[in-house]
Amino acid sequence: MSDRLFFFSGLLGLGTLAVTLVLSLVGPGEIGPMAPGFNSPVLAFEFAESEAEVRALFEPAGSAAAMDRVNRWDFLYMVLYSLFLAVFALAAALETDQYTPRIAAALPLVILFADVMENVQLFRLTAQLGLDGGSMDPALGRLHLFTWLKWGGLALYFVLISGYFREQPGLWRFVWVTADIPALLAIWAFFWRGQVHEYMALSIGLLFLLLVVFAWWRALTSGLQARGV
């Protein structure tokens, strides 16, 4: 059963990577000044702390519409990656006596909720760009909450799944060490804003890739063993 779940998670992981490529292609071609330390417009928007930052970010014509396009595609992306994480954790939970993968299997529901609510705030902010009145502060406050619930949830997921890798053979065993890095960076980023947010996102992206590779490795090696190869 776990082998089939790893295969299914591998398919979901490939779908997630494909949509990641789409997101990189439909994003804003030009963007305004980002807050110090940020290189990604998406991260700069998600972690925006003031109306001035939002307005500066979308100074170029058409940039807000392009960001809305990214966030519409993001709904497909969040469903795929949440399913991927949940199915991967379920597969891991079937192979270990540890309780943490079982918690990890439920956590993507919280992450998905947070990501949906984060996007709702992002759409509200871009909608307010063309309005003369009204403060962005309420939406920015909610954005801060849901953005950290999403990224913090992702970091916690890898902490919960790390123990499973400690039981794996060969080099895969060392994933349990790297799986704790996003959580450490998330704590750092919560108190010190800037470049560390980029490092946090990068570390989570690399662990996503490692999990996809592992899922396919498990599915393929299990298939070969079943055929007696």
Image (cartoon, helix red, strand yellow):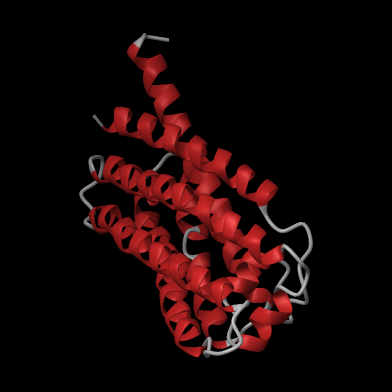
Question: Horizontally, is 6 left or right of 93 in the view?
Answer: right
Asked if one can make out residue 184 in the rendered structure from this viewpoint, the answer is no
Residue at screen point 62% across, 65% down? 42
Residue at 73% across, 68% down: 39
Towards the viewer: 199 or 176: 199
**Rendered location of residue 20, percent (x, y):** 58, 46
Q: Quadrant of the N terminus?
A: top left
Q: Is residue 118 above or below residue 169?
A: below
In the image, is 93 to the left or to the right of 181?
A: left
Note whether 120 is above or below 210 in the view shown. below
Q: Residue furthest front?
A: 132
Q: Where 7 falls versus 229 (above or below)?
A: below
Relative image position of residue 79 (x, y in whole percent) = 39, 48
* Position of residue 158 measured from the top left corner of the image (x, y, whole percent): 42, 59
Question: Which corner quadrant holds the C terminus?
Answer: top left
Q: Quick check: can you spot residue 65?
A: yes
Question: Residue 222 at what x, y percent from top left?
Answer: 37, 22
Of residues 148 and 216, the one nearer the viewer is 148
